[in-house]
Each structure stands twice: as structure tokens, then as C-alpha cells.
């Protein structure tokens, strides 16, 4: 059966598409529109250009038409206006000017360990963070925009008297990160419609009671995604790698050990670990020390201790683990355009082991599916 994404866009053609893409579609940010050859493109021009009129009438556009995108995902602008957070909700210090001032002054060698009051505050904010992620994930379906998911997430935060931590953090313009297919992380919600066959990571962080929660999951969009063996291998291996790393968390576990477990499992399934991004401490600050690598042979120092709260959030790829940034200075993508997946939990080191503060609930959307046998 021919993959629709690889099929020529010519109405009278059943060949596979080549690398020739309609230049007008590229400028407008339209997905696909690849043709097998120039003659086929010219033959179908009269009917194909109707697509441009529909797109143009909406006012949507690709803000970086000359940028050499590595894959098929494109930004679709304009971005919606910044969503307001009532002043009655406690704001972090970057809410107004975009600068995390306290975080920037932190001593990177000094770790915080929470007392019982702080631990209870983290339990509460992480419980609320799980609710926000689940509500946002329940809205995922083919045909909705990532901006709509941002609206759902933002409203869920406000309803819980919480500030969406990413909003204006170092000037990030939205309340959640939506990373589709080859987007490694920090995708900006926009007017792009998510499609049957996409995989989508939702990275939710919220600020409540003076503390932050941070969690993310990668979801299958539609039945087509759940029928793609490579996407399943990628998503489920990433999910398993996080679970395996969490399983060794306890007092005395060296920080460097997590990367060994994650990379070994990734390579057993033919996948690569993105090295640029790692886990981090989290408490009354969004990204305090320590930084926690997810790859083997790292030189991280220190061990887990009771009262420590931190994240693990491995990112695996189907191809190379090298990435690049779009001109928006946020969206990070694989250089080969192949897909990536990520999962994240916030956890507390206890006297005897670990408490996963952002654990899935029985009714949480998504969840694992079997990896097809090779």
C-alpha cells in the first residue's frame, strides 16, 4: 500500500513523490504538496493552485519561507496573542520582562533539598500538573491546531489557580511546548493542524504555591500513527527508557548512572539519545541544579539524596541525535528530519527510594501500546 505522505500530489498521478515541492505551498507553510517531476507539477497546476487561494484567504503563512527545514513540519503563523493570567494568581519573576532573575543567580554547585512542607507543596503542584497534561492530551485529535491545545492547557492552568511556567520564560510566547514529529523540543504552538499519523509531545509545566511541576509525554495522533512501526518503536522505547531510569532512583544513586541505562536501552532498539537536553532540579525554581545527562559516559557528579526533587526527560530519535534550531530561536529539530520522542516525570527522592510526583493516573490519556515484532 502506498504511503499517502510519499504519494505524488498530482491528481492524475499514482507515482511516489520526489523532492520537488510546490514553491507557493512552501511559502505558505502547507504540508506536503510534493510532486514526482516537473512535468507532473505543470500538468496539475490549474487544479493545484486552488489550494493556495484557500490558504491565502485565512491569512496564514510560513514566517521563514527561505529557511532550509530538515523535515516536513512548518511553522504556521500568525501566532495568537499572549494569553493573560489573572493577577490574583502568583506569577514567577519572569512573567513581566521574560527574565528568570532568581534562577540566573543560582549557584550551579548548590543543590536544594526540601523539608516536609516543601515536599508537600511539590506533591500538590505535580498533582495539578498531571491534571493539566491529561486535560490537554484529551483534546488531541487530527484536525485541531497546536494553538488550540495551548488554549486548553492555559485555561486548565488558570482554573487551578496556577501560572503556566513556560509563558514568557526567556520570552517563550506560549503556555505549553508542542513538539511534532521531527521537533525535538520547545515547539511553539501555532496554527498548524495536527494530522493523522503525527506524533506529538506535550510538555506541561505549571507554577502553584511557589513551586513548579514539569512533565511531558509523546502521544499518537490518530490510528495511522498507531499503525507505524517506527513511530511505535521510538515512542515506546523512550517511555520504557524513562521508566527504567526511574527504577534505580534512591539515596546514593550516582547522577551519572541514569544516562547509562537510557542510552543502553535506546541503542538496543536502534535509536539515538539527544545529548543537548537533560533532566534538572525543580522546586521553587524552574530549572535549578543539578543538570542530569541522559547519555552514557557522562561526567555528572553527585548522588541522589532524600528531599531532592528533579526531572528525568530522555529524548530519543529514529536517526541522528544532532539537532538545529528554527529562526524562532526555540523550536529544536533533528537535522535529518527524522522523528523524535520524549517523556518526562518530576520525582522526589525519599529515604528508601523514589516517589514519582507526576505519575500517570488510571484514566490518563495515551499510554503504552505493543511494539510490533520485527
Image: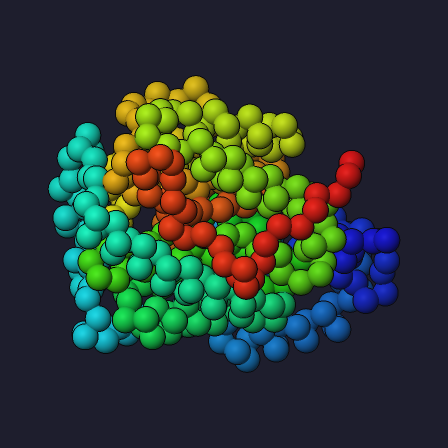
Percent from the top left, x then y, of residue 361? 50, 58
Decide if residue 203 is in sight here.
yes
Q: Residue at x 53, y 78 (%)?
A: 58
Residue situated in front as seen by the camera: 237 or 15: 237
Which image quadrant for residue 230?
top right
- What is the quadrant of residue 9 in the picture? bottom right
Quadrant hosting residue 110 = top left
Q: Quadrant of the C terminus?
A: top right
**Residue with the most extreme front position:** 352
Q: How is the image coloured?
A: rainbow
Q: Mark yes or no: residue 24 visible.
A: no
Question: Measured along the vertical axis of the image, is residue 371 above or below residue 163?
Answer: above
Q: Total marks drawn?
A: 0
Residue 167 percent coordinates (x, y): 30, 61
Is 162 drawn above or below residue 182 in the view shown? Answer: below
Residue 269, image x and y in percent? 65, 32
Amino acid at each position: 500500500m502506498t504511503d499517502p505522505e510519499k504519494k505524488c500530489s498530482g491528481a492524475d498521478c499514482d507515482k511516489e513523490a520526489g523532492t520537488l515541492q510546490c514553491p507557493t505551498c512552501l511559502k505558505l507553510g502547507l504540508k506536503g504538496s510534493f510532486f514526482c517531476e516537473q512535468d507532473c507539477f505543470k500538468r496539475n497546476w490549474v487544479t493545484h493552485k486552488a489550494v493556495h487561494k484557500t490558504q491565502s484567504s485565512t491569512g496564514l503563512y510560513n514566517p521563514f519561507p527561505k529557511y532550509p527545514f530538515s523535515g516536513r513540519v512548518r511553522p504556521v503563523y500568525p501566532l495568537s496573542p499572549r494569553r493573560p493570567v489573572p493577577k490574583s494568581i502568583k506569577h514567577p519573576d519572569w512573567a513581566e520582562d521574560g527574565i528568570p532573575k532568581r534562577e540566573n543567580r543560582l549557584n550551579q554547585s548548590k543543590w536544594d533539598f526540601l523539608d516536609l512542607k516543601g515536599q508537600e507543596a511539590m506533591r500538590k503542584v505535580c498533582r495539578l500538573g498531571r491534571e493539566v497534561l491529561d486535560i490537554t492530551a484529551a483534546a488531541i485529535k487530527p484536525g485541531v491546531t497546536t494553538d488550540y491545545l495551548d488554549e486548553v492547557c492555559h485555561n486548565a492552568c488558570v482554573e487551578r489557580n496556577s501560572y503556566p511556567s513556560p509563558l514568557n520564560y526567556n520570552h517563550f510566547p506560549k503556555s505549553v511546548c508542542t513538539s511534532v514529529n521531527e521537533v525535538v523540543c520547545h515547539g511553539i504552538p501555532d496554527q498548524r493542524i495536527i494530522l493523522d499519523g503525527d506524533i506529538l509531545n506535550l510538555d506541561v509545566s505549571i507554577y502553584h504555591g511557589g513551586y513548579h511541576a514539569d512533565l511531558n509525554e509523546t502521544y499518537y495522533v490518530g490510528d495511522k500513527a498507531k499503525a507505524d512501526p517506527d513511530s511505535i518503536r521510538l515512542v515506546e522505547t523512550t517511555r520504557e527508557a524513562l521508566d527504567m531510569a526511574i527504577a534505580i532512583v534512591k539515596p546514593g544513586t550516582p547522577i551519572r548512572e541514569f544516562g547509562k541505562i537510557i542510552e543502553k536501552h535506546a541503542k538496543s532498539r536502534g535509536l539515538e539519545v539527544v545529548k543537548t537536553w537533560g533532566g534538572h532540579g525543580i522546586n521553587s525554581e524552574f530549572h535549578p541544579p543539578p543538570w542530569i545527562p541522559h547519555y552514557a559516559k557522562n561526567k555528572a557528579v553527585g548522588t541522589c539524596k532524600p528531599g531532592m526533587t528533579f526531572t528525568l526527560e530522555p529524548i530519543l530519535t529514529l536517526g541522528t541525535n544532532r539537532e538545529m534550531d528554527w529562526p524562532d530561536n526555540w523550536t529544536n529539530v533533528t537535522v535529518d528530519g527524522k522523528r523524535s520522542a520524549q517523556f518526562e516525570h518530576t520525582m522526589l527522592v525519599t529515604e528508601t527510594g523514589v516517589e514519582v510526583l507526576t505519575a500517570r493516573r488510571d484514566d490518563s490519556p495515551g499510554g503504552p501500546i505493543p511494539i510490533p515484532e520485527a
